Amino acid sequence: MLDIVIIGSGPAGLTAAIYATRAKLDLLVIEENFVSGGQVINTYEVDNYPGLPGINGFDLAMKMREHAEKLGAVFVNEKVTEVSLYGAVKTVKTEDNTYEAKTVLIATGASHRKLGCPGEEEFAGKGVSYCATCDGAFYRDKAVAVMGGGNTAIEDAIFLSRLCSRVYVIHRRDELRADRALQEKLFAAENVEMVWSGVISSIEGDEKVGIVRVRSTKDGSERTIEVSGVFVAVGIVPLSGLFASQVETDEAGYIVAGEDGETNIPGVFAVGDVRTKNLRQIITAASDGANAVTSAEKYLNTCS
Ligand code: NAP
């Protein structure tokens, strides 16, 4: 039986793997995606991770993964389908295998929130994207829209402003949520136009996106903007569905856990973007991984 199964390989899961190998725990990391790193791999430039200013998100994720592997962490690329978390022996089933472990660390992170407007689904992959660094190059010298006012949207808009002819940043309020440093970079870009107090009411086109309709949140008036691409960055939703019938979650679906990662079930820990917390950043995800492994070690000591 394993000491710990880590589900997910973003910064929280990878840091947990590093700490667990150093603690000599018998561990397995189960990752669903072919590339480790979670949301970080979609970040062009990470400018707030200590010691690595301006590092590319993909490169940072690879460094973390290599670090964990170098220390001996074992990874499998499988999709978890079912978990049984109560009791001393936890079971994690994937499409291919069943694993038994004394502790489980949930590091599944979060995924993109959808806009839910007409055209979003229809044009997904045909002009609608949730990843500027993945798809931005398709829109070189074209006009695009970014919807959202948080760090992700503004990072995306800065990245796109270096490639695209024009970037419309559409935000539902008249003040951005993103960090000041990012706002300054954004406002310095000459080809960025802010569309304040607006939401995309529909995305339209023939075979590919041609226009977005933007409805004013102030007076309901509508404006049409010609764009070839729409980048949606309106926040995240926690990937906790698989666990929600067993672990306690809040009303938004985040797994209730403190800095120690402890959930309502002994031996089950939640880390990174999937847990309740104030600040969702790479560094706080990494910190969670370290803390939760320390908690898991304490739990394992009380069991043995
Ligand atoms: P976020 O901070 O929750 O921002 C989401 C943005 O989308 C907000 O501006 C929000 O508007 C807007 N929004 C939400 N629902 C909407 C809807 N239905 N229609 C239109 N607009 C909507 O999400 P995020 O930017 O994806 O970031 C997620 C977390 O990762 C945050 O904690 C963020 O700080 C962190 N992050 C950090 C960095 C970094 O430090 N470099 C980079 C990326 C992400 P309101 O502002 O009006 O609520």
Image (cartoon, helix red, strand yellow):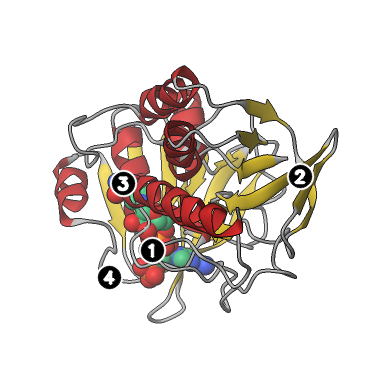
- Specify the quadrant of the image occupied by residue 117: bottom right
4 or 1: mark nearer the eye: 1
Give the CA distance from mark 4 to mark 1: 34 Å
Label 4 packing within 10 angstroms: few (<14), some (14-19), many (20+): some
First in sequence: mark 1 vs mark 3: 1
Residue 168 shows up from this direction = no
Mark number, residue 100:
2
What amino acid type should be assigned to the residue bearing mark 3? Ile
Mark 2 element type: strand
Q: Residue at x 22, y 30 (%)?
A: 54
Q: Position of residue 10 (x, y in %)?
A: 49, 40
Mark number, residue 259:
1
What amino acid type should be assigned to the residue bearing mark 2? Glu
Q: Point out the image quarter for the N terminus.
A: top right
Q: Position of residue 74 (x, y in %)?
A: 60, 26
First in sequence: mark 4 vs mark 1: 4
Q: Pick whichever, 267 or 171, lies toward us.
A: 267
Q: Which residue is mark 4?
A: 174
First in sequence: mark 2 vs mark 1: 2
Q: Which residue is mark 3?
A: 283
